[in-house]
Image: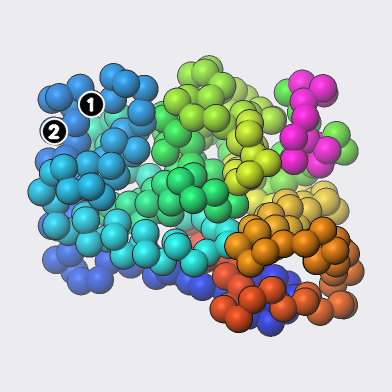
Amino acid sequence: IKKIEDQTKCKAQCIDYSSPRWDHSIFLTNEVREIFNYINKNDLCKSGASRAEVFIDLVKNKKIDAPVCWDVIDKISQIAKNLDCIFLPGGEDIPQIWYGGSDSIYDDHYRTLVELTLIHEARQRGIPLMGVCRGHQVIHVYHGKKLIDSPSGYYGNQTFTLIDPKQKGLLAPLFCDTVIGEVMHHQGVNIAEGQNGTGDLEPLTVQNDLVKAAESKYGAGSPVITTQFHPEIYGTRGSGPLSKNNEKFFEILHESAIVRNHKKTGITAEALVEARNNLKNPQKKLPPVNPRPFNSFIYSFIQNYFGRA
């Protein structure tokens, strides 16, 4: 994040994931439970849309009375209008009700609703999107995937290779060279459920039947990058050194944001080439692209950044 800020000379826009008030979480939980009861009763996911997509559509378009949820979704939707890319980090578990499991009185839905709304806006508006650990999981939940709870042995370093050496895409070249990443998660995306769920996510690498990285099949316009491992950790930790190319995941997101920003301001081939050259040569300063701040990342300041996910 600091590298991005240094290059763009702008601060990343951040969203606080904590609920506005202690009682807000209670009202939100009640509304979430009522909306999912309505979705289940009326079998609204039979069309193939995910539970999260149906939920956001119902609330955003006021097809159901849910003032607390509507306030959250509307606020985040307005913020997303000015973003050039979105990054979703690791953190605590995702409540099971969002992917078809049971609900709990202890569930805190605020962060999940914020992130699912950001994903919805990214897919609708063509905003480049990246998720790590919990971010990887919540993006798959939005696209109709279920999560496996409590897989064992998922802490430490793992080595990743392509499922199919012939795979193409933005991330595939990174996995042609061995990628070693650090994992620490409590939920996972199971490959056996089907490669894409209801969306266009394509798994790239798998460990013990869990998807460890994926990207959007049709990512040329608005790439989606997800990793269960932590590419932001690319130094030596734990059992040994990690891949030197882990940083490139963020470079891809950064370049995608530059392209999106230029598209909105009248891009020229020369300007895009210059922006790409500057990205590869960090000591250079990126050229100004328009008067408004360059919103490179949206990032959460949560105390448990390396909490369970």
Quarter of the image with the N terminus in it: bottom right
Q: Nearer the viewer, residue 74 or 180?
A: 74
Q: Nearer the viewer, residue 309 or 173?
A: 173
**Which segment is the magenta one?**
164-175
Q: Is residue 171 magenta?
A: yes
Mark yes or no: residue 265 visible.
Answer: yes
Q: Is residue 273 above or below residue 229?
A: below
Residue visible at 49% across and 30% down in the picture: 199
- Distance of label 2 from label 1 (alpha carbons): 8 Å
Percent coordinates x, y for residue 56 in the rendering: 29, 44
Q: Which residue is mark 2?
A: 38
Q: Nearer the viewer, residue 264 or 244?
A: 264
Q: Which residue is mark 1?
A: 44
Asked which secondary structure carries label 2, the reply is helix
Q: Amino acid at mark 2?
A: Tyr
Percent coordinates x, y for residue 22 in the rendering: 18, 69
Q: Name the front one of labels 2 and 1.
A: 1
Q: Amino acid at mark 1?
A: Leu
Taken as a whole, is the magenta stretch helix, strand or loop? Answer: loop
Mark yes or no: residue 106 visible.
Answer: no
Residue visible at 54% across and 49% down in the picture: 126
Percent coordinates x, y for residue 44 in the rendering: 23, 26
Residue visible at 31% across and 65% down in the picture: 75
